[in-house]
Image (cartoon, grey):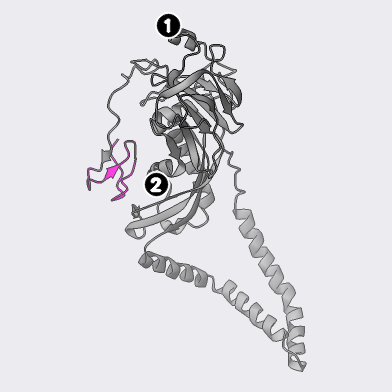
Amino acid sequence: MGSSNLIFLELIEWMDDDGTLLARRFPPEGSGEIKFGAQMIVRESQRGVFFYNGKAVHVFEPGRHTLKTANIPILNKILGIPWGLESPLRAEAYLVSTRVFPNLRWGTREPVAFKDKEFGLIRLRAYGVFTIQVIQPLLFINTLVGTMPAFATEAVADFLARVIVSRFNDFMGETLSSILELPGQYDEWSHGLTARLQQDFARYGLGLEGLYINAITPPPEVQKAMDDRTKLGMFSDMTRYLQLKAASALEKAAQNQGGAGEGLGLGVGFMMPSLMAQFLRNAGAVEASTPPSAEVPGPTLTCPECHTSISPHDRFCASCGHQLVVFAQCPSCGKNITPGARFCPRCGEKLGEAKPQPRHCPHCGGENLPNALFCNTCGERLSP
C-alpha cells in the first residue's frame, strides 16, 4: 500500500490484517493523486475497482495491473493528453474483499409479534448467524460503501440483520399457525429464509451463502404452557409410558447382586423379547408414517435474465450474453442499469427517484420495511 505521505500513489495493495473489512479505498482521504502507470496488486480473494470523477470505469480481476490505457482504454479519452500521460490522475480506487465472511449475527432487538391460533398474540425472540460474500463489487460499492474510506462487516451486519428479521417475520406468518408446530423445523426454515433473502442481498451486490436459526423463544408463560401440553401428550399414550417405566425398573433390578437380582435378571430375559418386539413394531409404524426429508439445494449464482448457472468470475452470460458486471439496478424490477440511464429498459421506471418509504401498519402504526408482508409490532398482515 502506498504511503500517505507520498505526493502520489505508485503502488495500490491491501493486506487485511484483522479480516473484518469488506472494502478499502485508495487514497483513504478521497480523490487523490494516483500516478499514471501505477501498479495495482489484486489478490485472489479481492477485486479492484477504479473510479474517475466519481464514476467506476474499470474492474480488475486478481493479478498485477498497470493503470495505463492498455488496461483501462477509457483513460485515453479522459486524459486528452493536455498534461502528458505521465501526470498523476485525480482518481481513486477500491479493493474489495470477495472472501466468505461467516458467523455474522442476526437477532430480534425487540420481540416480533405473532398471532398464534392456540395462544393468541404473543411476542417471539429469535437469533442466529449468517454468512455473506461480495459477488458484485461495483454494485456493492455504489449501494452500500458510498464514499467511506473503509467498510467493515459491522457496518453492514446491522442493516442486513434488520432485513433478515423482517423476512423471518413474513416467513413465520405465512408458514406457521402455532408455535407448537415449531420444534424440528429450524433447518427447513433456514433453507426457506435463505432462498427468500438471496434476492434481497443481491440488490446490494452480496451473496447469502447460508443462514442458520439458533433459537426461537416465546415468553416464559407460553413456554410453561407448551411444557404442560408436552406432558399431557406423553401421558395420553399410557401403554407406551408404562412399558418404558417397567423396562427401566427391571433393568435397574437386574443390576443388583444376589439371588433376587439373578431371579429378576432371568425374568427380564424372558420379558425382553416381547418388549423389544412391541418397540420395533411401534418404531416401524412411526418410520413408515414419516416421509423422507427432501434435499434442499444450496444457493447458486444464476444469470438474472435467463437463469443459467454462472461463475462469480464471468463478465457475460455464456447463454444469453447478458452483462453480469452490475453498476446499478432498477429499484422496481431489479434490471441491471447502465451508467447514466434515466429510465429502466425493462419496466420503464424513472430512475433517480426517491427511495421507497417504510410501510406503516394501518392497525398499530408500526414501521416496517417497504416490502414487508406482516407487521413486526402487532403481527397483522399488511395490506397489498
Considering the image in quadrants, where does the C terminus appear? top left
Question: Observer-nearest residue: 22 or 53?
Answer: 53
Q: Residue at x 47, y 14 (%)?
A: 87
Which disc number belongs to residue 21?
Answer: none
Q: Residue at x 50, y 43 (%)?
A: 20
Which quarter of the picture shows residue 349?
A: top left
Residue neighbourhood size for the residue with mark 2, other residues' Cα within 10 Å, grouped as few (<14), some (14–19), many (≥20): many
Q: Position of residue 101 (x, y in %)?
A: 53, 42
Q: Assess whether residue 342 is covered by the magenta stretch.
A: no
- In the picture of the structure, the residue carrying the numbered disc 1 is 82
Give the residue type at disc 1: Pro
The vertical placement of 263 against 43, above or below, is below
Q: Assess whether residue 378 is covered by the magenta stretch.
A: yes
Toward the bottom, the furthest residue is 259
**Would you say 235 lies left or right of 266 here?**
left
Q: Position of residue 175 (x, y in %)?
A: 43, 47
Q: Earlier in the sequence, mark 1 or mark 2?
A: 1
Stretch of the chain drawn in magenta: 362-384
The vertical placement of 31 against 118, above or below, is above
Q: Position of residue 71 (x, y in %)?
A: 56, 15
* Figure label count: 2
- In the picture of the structure, the residue carrying the numbered disc 2 is 165
Give the residue type at disc 2: Val
- What SS does tag 1 mark? loop
Question: Marks 1 and 2, Cα distance to the nearest angstrom?
Answer: 54 Å
- What SS does tag 2 mark? helix
